[in-house]
């Protein structure tokens, strides 16, 4: 083969690779993924224990509850709404799981109770937003406090203890060497990703969040799309609550407090636009793992805990600012 022919052959082979890399770098979750790799390298150099298999598995287990809830909240944000009631919703679902577990034992009945409670709370949020025409930030802020009050009324302010071992399986057991919480998180990611790509509802979520007026003119079921997104949050919170109870072995009345901020952080840091319509199912998973790596790495290198909230807040501001700049650049280029 001549020199020119060889160069052309190399060019033909590398061009698709270059285009593929360029397309991947333009994906919403690409900046977070790159940052995650950089952090993994930095913390592994700064702390000998960081890159051990046990520590990496510990990070994934710790963020499983966060990642599962973020997967569903991601769909709400993609649809142009927001849900900041998930912390209190987790607490209420945990109470349902704990109450049924102490009464009946087993796993399926407590899991079903947690999911049903979550779906009911999520549906209430969705109905108030869609039928009541109340902004989702107002609805879910009210639910954040209302559900916390329900928890205190139901429990009388006392903890639920002595959770049966069979109920704790989802939080403590392993499957093929993988902790069940991690397995559940990635299994739910695969399901959400498939639904987002291959179902009418999944495509409608992006359309409704991207341009609601155009979606309405196109005849899309806007209210149904948003209602199902809020109900999905409730279902995933119920699953996450069962894992939470399994790992904790008890239900505290303050369970889930502050979780909503980490969930929003995971979604936004992962690359989903807070304005809706742009993101992916992978974004909240990467965001959740990124948060877990940051918190774990900061502890191992001796950074005081008071800096954790400041770092997460700074990352949220950076992610939102980057998204806004990207949308302006894309809009200007168009």
Image (cartoon, helix red, strand yellow):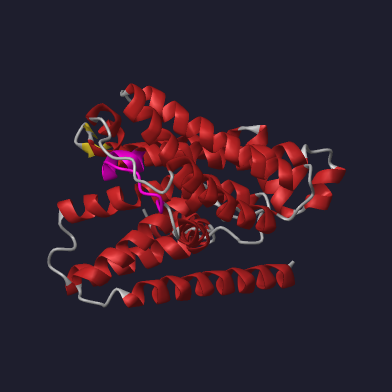
- For the residue pair 65 and 118, the one nearer the viewer reads as 118
Query: Is residue 39 magenta-colored?
Result: no
For the C terminus, the image quarter is bottom right
- For the residue pair 17 and 283, the one nearer the viewer reads as 283
- Number of disc labels: 0
- Residue at 46 percent across and 76 percent down: it is 314
Query: Is residue 246 magenta-colored?
Result: yes
For the question of whether residue 294 can be seen, the reply is yes
Residue 59 found in image quarter: bottom left
Instruction: Name the outermost residue toward the right.
Output: 217
Residue 101, x across and y down, in percent:
34, 29
Residue 61, x across and y down, in percent:
28, 48
For the question of whether residue 5 can be seen, the reply is no
Taking the image as shown, residue 85 lies to the left or right of residue 171, namely right
Taking the image as shown, residue 171 lies to the left or right of residue 285, namely left
Residue 292, x across and y down, in percent:
33, 59
- Residue at 40 percent across and 75 percent down: it is 311
Residue 287, x across and y down, in percent:
43, 58
- For the residue pair 16 and 155, the one nearer the viewer reads as 155
- Residue at 35 percent across and 25 percent down: it is 103
What are the residue bounds of the magenta stretch?
Answer: 243-255
Taking the image as shown, residue 74 lies to the left or right of residue 128, namely left
Residue 323 found in image quarter: bottom right
């Amino acid at each position: 083969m001549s020199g020119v022919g060889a160069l052309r052959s190399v060019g033909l082979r590398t061009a698709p690779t270059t285009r593929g890399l360029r397309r991947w770098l333009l994906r919403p979750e690409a900046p977070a993924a790159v940052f995650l790799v950089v952090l993994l390298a930095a913390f592994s150099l700064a702390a000998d224990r960081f890159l051990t298999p046990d520590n990496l598995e510990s990070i994934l287990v710790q963020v499983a509850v966060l990642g599962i809830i973020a997967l569903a909240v991601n769909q709400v944000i993609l649809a142009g709404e927001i849900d900041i009631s998930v912390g209190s919703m987790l607490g209420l679902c945990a109470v349902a799981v704990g109450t049924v577990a102490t009464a009946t034992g087993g796993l399926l009945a407590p899991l079903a109770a947690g999911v049903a409670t979550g779906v009911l709370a999520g549906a209430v949020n969705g109905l108030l937003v869609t039928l009541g025409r109340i902004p989702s930030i107002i609805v879910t802020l009210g639910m954040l406090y209302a559900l916390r009050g329900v928890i205190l009324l139901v429990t009388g302010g006392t903890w639920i203890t002595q959770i049966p071992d069979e109920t704790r399986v989802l939080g403590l057991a392993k499957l093929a060497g993988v902790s069940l919480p991690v397995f559940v998180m990635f299994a739910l990611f695969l399901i959400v990703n498939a639904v987002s790509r291959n179902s009418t509802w999944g495509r409608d979520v992006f359309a409704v969040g991207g341009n609601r007026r155009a979606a309405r003119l196109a005849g899309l079921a806007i209210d149904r799309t948003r209602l199902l997104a809020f109900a999905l949050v409730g279902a995933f919170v119920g699953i996450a609550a069962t894992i939470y109870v399994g790992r904790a072995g008890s239900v505290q009345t303050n369970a889930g407090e502050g979780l909503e901020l980490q969930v929003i952080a995971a979604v936004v840091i992962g690359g989903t636009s807070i304005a809706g319509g742009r993101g992916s199912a992978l974004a909240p998973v990467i965001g959740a793992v990124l948060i877990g790596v940051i918190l774990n790495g900061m502890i191992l290198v001796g950074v005081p805990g008071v800096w954790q909230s400041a770092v997460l807040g700074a990352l949220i501001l950076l992610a939102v600012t980057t998204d806004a700049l990207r949308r302006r650049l894309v809009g200007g280029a168009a």
